[in-house]
Amino acid sequence: MQRAAVFDVDGTLVDTNHLHVTTWWEALRQAGHRVPMHAVHRAIGLGSDDLVAHLLGDDRDKDQDDELSAAHKALYGQYFDRLPALQDAGRLLRRLDQDGWRVVLATSAGGAELSALRRAISADDAIMATASADDVAEGKPAPEPVEHALELAGVPAERAVFVGDTVWDMQAGSRAGVRCVGVLCGGIPRADLVEAGAQAIYDDPAHLLATLADSPLA
């Protein structure tokens, strides 16, 4: 039977979480909202609408949501030509592909942003498909992104592993019924990832690749 290796992208394969923190903080600041960066960091991994709701609450001026999202996209877009892949991210995906895994990305990114991330990873030959924010009604921590990735791979949940860096990733994967692997390179503490459902934890893609034989992706 086929197996699927599903990967989050931001903070898992590409070192972008703190760029997102800075650009969301600036977008919020420009709109008159004072939100501490540590709070923004904890919200990274949510889709734009959910992130704004998480940070500003349900009593916010919701008419401002689209403006905040557009401001963040404009600020973050300045980095598209130099997004840094995490060490061995591309090598890890190609190794899994060679080992017979169907590699699928599950990300809240879409459009030009997703294209920039894929260029940074530079492993398109190993990526079977991508489940983006454009493809689902609800983003993480809902299970839809992971479930859609499994549909694209044609693989049942019990034959899949999901790798991510945030609590939202681990919750989404757990709700989809897949084994969850956490990485620490997104800046979220080990204990939080374990509590959210991670069954194994690695420092980053390079660490996972180096210890692949003893991992859930063996």
Image (tube, rainbow, N blue to C red):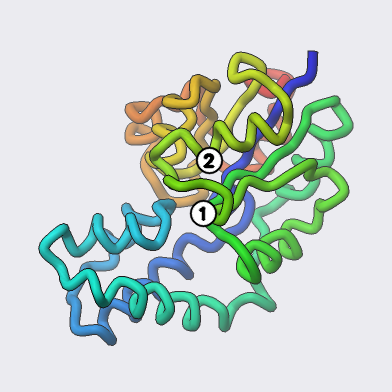
Query: Where the C terminus falls, by quadrant?
Result: top right
Q: Is residue 39 left or right of residue 118?
A: left
Number of numbered discs overlaid on the protein picture: 2
Q: Nearer the viewer, residue 186 or 102?
A: 102
Q: Residue at x 42, y 45 (%)?
A: 138
Q: Residue at x 82, y 52 (%)?
A: 124
Q: Residue at x 59, y 36 (%)?
A: 148
Q: Amino acid at mark 1?
A: Ser
- Give the percent coordinates (x, y) of residue 83: 64, 69
Disc 1 element = loop
Residue lying furthest bottom in this view? 30
Rendered view: 73 above or below 105: below
- Gap in angstroms between the C-alphas marked 1 and 2: 8 Å
Q: Amino acid at mark 2?
A: Pro
Q: Is residue 15 left or right of residue 50?
A: right
Tell me the crowding category of disc 2: few under 14, some 14 to 19, or many 20 or more residues within 10 angstroms, Cα based: many
Q: Nearer the viewer, residue 121 or 149?
A: 149
Question: Label 1: which residue?
Answer: 108
- Give the percent coordinates (x, y) of residue 61: 17, 72
Q: Is residue 160 left or right of residue 16?
A: right
- Give the percent coordinates (x, y) of residue 128: 79, 41
Q: Residue 24 appears in which quarter of the rendering? A: bottom left
Q: Are marks 1 and 2 in contact (CB under 8 Å)?
A: yes
Question: Label 2: which residue?
Answer: 145
Q: Residue 110 appears in which quarter of the rendering? A: bottom right
- Give the percent coordinates (x, y) of residue 54: 24, 55
